[in-house]
Structure formats: structure tokens, C-alpha cells
Amino acid sequence: MFGLTAIECFIVFVAVFAVVYWITPQKHSWFPLVVITVLLAVLAYHMVPNVTDDLSRYYQELRYMRERGTDELDRAFSENLYEWNTYRVIPYYFYLISRLPNNAWLQTVTIFIVYGLMFLVIYKASKRFEINKLNMFLGTMFFISTYWFYDTASGIRNGLSFAIAFACAYYHLVERKNIALCYVGYILACFSHSAGIMPVLMVIIAELTLNTSGKFMNFILLFGIVGGGVFIQFLAGRTDNNFVQSIAGKAENHGLADSLETGTMFRVNLTVLAFVTILFIYVAYYLLHSDYTNELKRLYKYFSINIYFMFGSILSGLVFVRFARWILPMIGALLFMIGMQIQSNQIEREGRAKLTYFAPFNQSIRIKTRPFVYILYVVYTGVHFWYLCAGSSLNWIHF
């Protein structure tokens, strides 16, 4: 496309976003987000799946649906293809896509939905918390650099279910709007893929423990993935419910020893978790001591639960990797945008000198290290963007 390789197109599209972003007035900050969403969808449309990708198998199923219509849906359900008797959202999604002219629309629509939802959350957060242009840009670039484009486009179901769950979690916990639609989104996420229940479970735990200290729950989350596997096997032995049986089968097939990863991509995911955790510790004070008490208390709880759960799931590679690729990028982006903006507001309101020399130590040290945090965030984003283009699964993309 345009005489460029797929990776070169990705880099150019991100550069176009950066230029458009800085020439667009802040009151229209939604526009560059729409531009990059459309450009990434165009990139997805032209990509050719590899033989080993899930997308190649889905193409075959789309062809059958295009030829046989609803008869193919009936066959898929009767044969429980891909466990579609349980996860019925995806076959209907595939059927709708099969009505479009060609198979490439599958990854195109998926990328448009996934990135559109994530950029919508960034935009809504920027408006609610009055994020300045620089902080919004840096947060958005962190998301772009750490989100796994190729895995989303080639795997379809994981990225879609996690994006729906996270967007609904933000609206549910922060915006407090369209709660009924959020519940519908949670159901769609759970019945799109077996992994979709995990980000939804994090929301449930956040709601249930909102007014508690959370120390006991954090301990449970650290070690709960093992106990959760035992519990689901217990349930599976006492019910023939298809959903429970499917989750139990996944838990059994992906035990700790079998799913542990040690490759470069896994280690990169570990560095993202470590970096986001450090950022979380740095901005936690501002999330809990601001004018947005209720919204940020809920967001703080949700983020902390996800982070603790991720540390507890490190030995279960598949669970950990999914959260690292489809949840952590948004947490890192929102933590920086919101936390650093609240810090900026505090400096403007109370004065840098007062906060540096007369504030309590935990506040003073944050002000003194503020320039270092900005530099570290920019450097880490740049390094991860380089890795995204040079060493991640994005290298498998081609036209």
C-alpha cells in the first residue's frame, strides 16, 4: 500500500496522527482520534493473515456463511464449532460480517471497534478530568505503543471481548452513564470468548470491595488464580452448564506449568507491568486526593485490582499476557493523563515552591521527581514503540 510495507504504513499512520493532533484545536481533540482509528482500520483491511493465524480459519468459516447463510450457523451450533454453543456472540458477529463484500472486513471492523472504544475512553477521560493537550498526547501514544495491534487483528475474539469489557468498566465506574448498556456489554464480553469473563470479574470485585481497605482482597487476587481454578473444577463436577464446563476446560488445559512463557514478548509484558505499577504508586496520591473523589476512588480500586491480579497471574501465561496486551496499555495511559494533570492543577493552585519545600515528604518527593517521571514516560513509550515495530508480533503483518 502506497509502495510501503505494512510496518512502514503503521509508522506513517502514527506520524500522521501526531501531526494532525498538534494542529487540531484542543476542543476538537476527538478528530485526530477518529483519524488514527480509520487509518488503523485501513491498515487492517489490507493485511493478509498468516496460515497459522486464527484469522485464516475464520476466513474459511466466513466463506461458508456467505455461501450457505443461516444454514451454516445452524451447522456450527449443532456441531459446537469453536464452542459456539456457549460463546454465541461471535458466530452472529461473523454472520453479520459475512454479509459484507469480502473477508477482510472481519479484521477491519474489529480494529475499528476495538481502537474506537479505547480512544473513546481516552477522549471521555480527557474531557471529564480536563486533561491538557500534552498529557493527553503522551497518554495516547503510550496506549498506541503498548497495545498489540496484530494480535487484535489476527485473533479477533480476545481483543474484542477485552475492549468491550474495559470500555464498559470505564463508563460504569467513572462516567456513571448508560449503566444498562454497560451490563449488556459485560454479557457480550463474557459470551464472546472464555477469557472475557476475567476483565468483567475485575469490575465485579471492584464494586464489591469499593468501601473496604482491600488488603485481604489484594492477597486473594495475588494467589486467587490457583484457587479459582480449583473452584471452577469443583463447580464443573456438579453442573452440566455449558459455560461452566467451557471455563473449566480452559482452566484444565492451560495449567501453570503448561502456560508459563519465558520468551522475549513475555518479558516485555513483564516490563510493562513493572512500569505501570511504578506509575500507579506515583500517581495514587493524586487519584485519592482530588476534587474528583468518587470517580477516581472507583477507578483507583479497579486499576489496583487489575494490577494485583496480574501479579498473581504471572505464572499463568495466557491470562497474564491477555491482560498485559489489552488492559495494561489503557491503565498506563489513563494513570498518566489523570494523575499528572491533577498534579499540574495542584502546582498551579498552591505553587511549586510550597509543594517542594513545605509539603509533607510524600508530596514533596513527587513534585521534585516530576520532570524525571515525564522523561521516563516519554523514553519508555519511545522504546516500546521501537519494540512494537522491530520485535513484536507486528512484524508478522504483511500485505
Image (cartoon, rainbow, N blue to C red):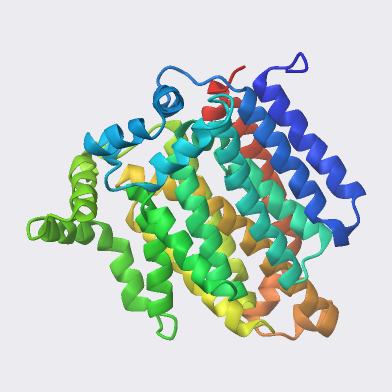
In the figure, 285 relative to 308: above or below? Answer: below
Q: Residue at x 33, y 43 (%)?
A: 317
As rendered, which of 229 and 221 lies closer to the eye? 229
- Residue 115 in sight here: yes
Residue 256 drawn at (x, y percent): 23, 45
* Picture layout, residue 207 above or below residue 88: below
Furthest toward the left, the residue is 237
Residue 37 at what x, y percent from top left? Answer: 70, 42
Give the quarter of the figure containing the C terminus. Answer: top right
**Residue at 85%, 78% in the rendered image:** 348
In this view, 124 is above or below 260: below
Identify which residue is drawn at 43% across, 55% down: 188
Figure disc tally: 0
Residue 131 % position (x, y)? 77, 66
For the N terminus, give its image quadrant. Answer: top right
Q: Quadrant of residue 278?
A: bottom right
Relative to 172, is 333 on the left or the right? right
Q: Is any part of residue 299 visible from this angle?
A: no
Q: Nearer the viewer, residue 262 or 309?
A: 309
Q: On the rendered structure, is 312 left or right of 288?
A: left
Residue 355: quarter of image: bottom right
Task: In this rendered view, identify the residue nearer to me: 86 or 101.
Answer: 101
239 with respect to 188 (left or right): left
Residue at (79%, 76%) from the top-left corner? 345
* Whole-percent x, y for residue 174 in the image: 59, 73
Residue furthest out toward the top: 3
Residue 351 vertical position relative to residue 139 in the rendered view, above or below: below
Where on the picture, by quarter, is residue 28? bottom right
